[in-house]
Amino acid sequence: MELTRSRITGAAIDLIERDGAAAFSMPGLASELGCGVVPLYGFMPSKAALLDRVTAAVTSKIELTARPGHEAGWKDRVFAEARAFREVGTEHPQCAVLAACRTRGSGGPQAPAEGAAAALSDAGFDRADSARIASAIRAYVLGSVVRDACLAPETPADEDFEFGLDLLLRAAAELLSAGG
């Protein structure tokens, strides 16, 4: 089968999900694809570039939808992003953790929750508080993804997730109303 960027990225996602990001290597990927390492570098200049592509592929699946029955506003925007990242994280938990750990400084896509930070800034939080709250939400979502990955698939945790996220957003709203 012919190598393509899409095939390489898909195989990298599968490998990361199976073995974890820490165990991922270009030689391991080459073995999985049945090719040598050198041809991979014809498509991807580096492992970091491939990991950025994996992150972009996974985070591109995040679809933001408003909560039914809620007004669109900063809390709804943050809630939608957190819920969407959790949904993708449930499908790809290892890649979700990888995406959350990669930063703009890596040259890769924006880490999940940067949209939340923008929504928080738009709501009137200062830059530092926006970043801190978005970081807390990202940690909460990742914790939820990890917890869900450890639970039996029959054990729904959606209600618990929504309850906890609502608590975080209420605390943020309280901080905003108190003036920071």
Image (spheres, grey):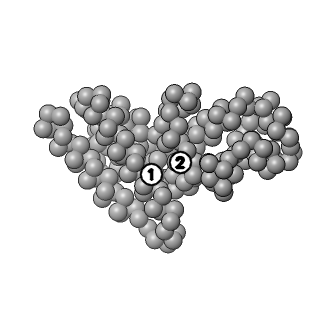
Distance, label 1 to label 2, CA atoms, is 8 Å
Give the camera-side residue of 52 and 78: 52
Looking at the rendering, in which quadrant would you find the C terminus? top left
Q: Secondary structure at mark 1?
A: helix
Q: Which residue is mark 1?
A: 142
Residue 10 visible in the shown view: no
Which quadrant of the view contains residue 127? top left
Q: Which residue is mark 2?
A: 96
Q: Secondary structure at mark 2?
A: helix
Find the residue positioned furthest to the left: 178
| Left or right: where 180 falls relative to 79 | left
Residues at marks 1 and 2 touching, judged by CB atoms closer than 8 Å:
yes
Circle 1 Cα neighbour tier, 10 Å, few/some/many (<14 / 14–19 / ≥20): many
Q: Earlier in the sequence, mark 1 or mark 2?
A: 2
Residue 165, image x, y percentages: 32, 52
Find the residue positioned furthest to the front: 22
Residue 129, image x, y percentages: 27, 34
Residue 173, image x, y percentages: 21, 42
Identity of the residue drawn at 65% across and 32% down: 49
Circle 2 Cα neighbour tier, 10 Å, few/some/many (<14 / 14–19 / ≥20): many
